[in-house]
Image (spheres, helix red, strand yellow):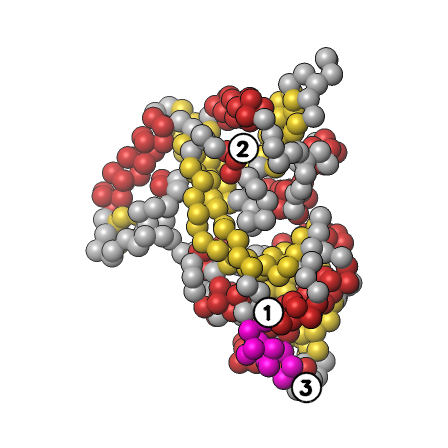
Amino acid sequence: MIQGAPRFRVLQCAQEQEWKGVLAQVAQHDFYHLTEYHRLAEERGEGTAYLFAYHEGAYTIALPLLLRPIEACDGETWSDATSVYGYAGPLASHAGTPASVVRSFQRSLKEALAARQVVAVFSRLHPLIPQCGVLAGLGECRREGETVSIDLTLPPEEQWAQYRSSLRTRISRLRREGLVCLRDGDKRHLPEFTDIYRQTMRRVNAHRSYFFEPEYFTRLASGLGPALELFVVTLDGVVIAGGLFTMFDGIVQYHLGGTSDAFLKLGPMALIFDTVRIWANDKGARVIHLGGGVGSRNDSLLHFKAGFSDRRHTFPTWRWVVEPDAYRELCDRGTRRNVEHGVQWASGDYFPQYRCRTVPAEEKACGAELEVDEARLA
């Protein structure tokens, strides 16, 4: 092969070293892009993971996706693509990738998806990594809401000063009252955290997809290894709250968390976030990304997170109909089936529409489907 000649590869999780080699060539990535995290999604039945990687000279563009089968339509078997839980999206080796390289990547991607009978693509994008530029012209990047992060490049005292005064008061009170937050380096409290997390999901009437099986947490810990951290709050030696965080490439992400029903009024998650901030500073991280509200909305969960920092980010998603005729037929067939069964789409804006859940026809469809009410998580 001529050095620098364009090359497009489609990798799967079994090609772990090649996948990692591609990630080593991009400017920045997060744990959401790792082979190990995609393998866990595969094990949970979320789809088959692929990394679409384009190389041209010094430039690399890569996109991880999960492909899911769709029932046969007009004798053809189709698939669609989505992203793993969290913030994934495309990655590039250079901020100023030439337009010609972007066009070649997009052309190669479209051919690869068409060859795999992919009808549509939906991906959550990463609020801290510029991504929409390499997707421009392929469907639509939408602003879904805001997320919150703590800037760890600021002096620690300035980080603390940005906290809402009521949060500073709460954190100080929790420490005075004997609550202790610690990093569980050996993850020996993972079983207790798993139980607390499930309590939290039941309390907030979460969608079934958020009820991760106990094996999920052990496989996550095994797969991510030292990139995954567990922090717990104890009171008189009893674990009452916990949070799973990742640290990768200078980014600390809040992944999952919860509080025991009996201690909800104490608000111990505030103590966890502050302890993680102190720990992340010591580790030399650049940022803690706390995420946003329920369904990207401006709600009480976002309000709680916003109390830790005044820094905001746009959370975008990407929607792309690759095969318009097949997409239209799948949606029309779903609509006809809904009419026959007296139901309707729960949301008029869900994508892809044919995967939207349904509600009785007499109920008014809402503008956006919420899968979990986590407003009381904190």
Q: CA distance from mark 1 to mark 3?
A: 21 Å
Q: Residues within 10 Å of mark 2 (few under 14, many from 20)?
A: many
Residue visible at 36% across and 49% down? 357
Give the position of the C terminus as an image quadrant. bottom right
Q: Is residue 367 above or below residue 56?
A: below
Residue topped by disc 2: 134
Residue topped by disc 3: 176
Q: In which image quadrant can residue 195 be found?
A: bottom right
Local SS, label 3: helix
Q: Which residues are drawn in magenta?
A: 162-173
Q: In which image quadrant can residue 191 be found?
A: bottom right
Q: CA distance from mark 2 to mark 1?
A: 34 Å
Amino acid type at mark 1: Gln
Amino acid type at mark 2: Val
Specify whether residue 299 is in view: yes
Residue visible at 66% across and 56% down? 287
Considering depth in this image, is 54 or 340 the residue closer to the camera?
A: 54
Amino acid type at mark 3: Arg
Residue visible at 61% across and 32% down? 96
Residue topped by disc 1: 162
Specify whether residue 215 is in view: no
Considering depth in this image, is 234 or 166 the residue closer to the camera?
A: 166
Tell me if 126 is positioned left or right of 156 in this view.
left
> Quick check: is 168 in the magenta stretch?
yes
> Quick check: is 165 in the magenta stretch?
yes
Q: Which mark, residue 213?
A: none
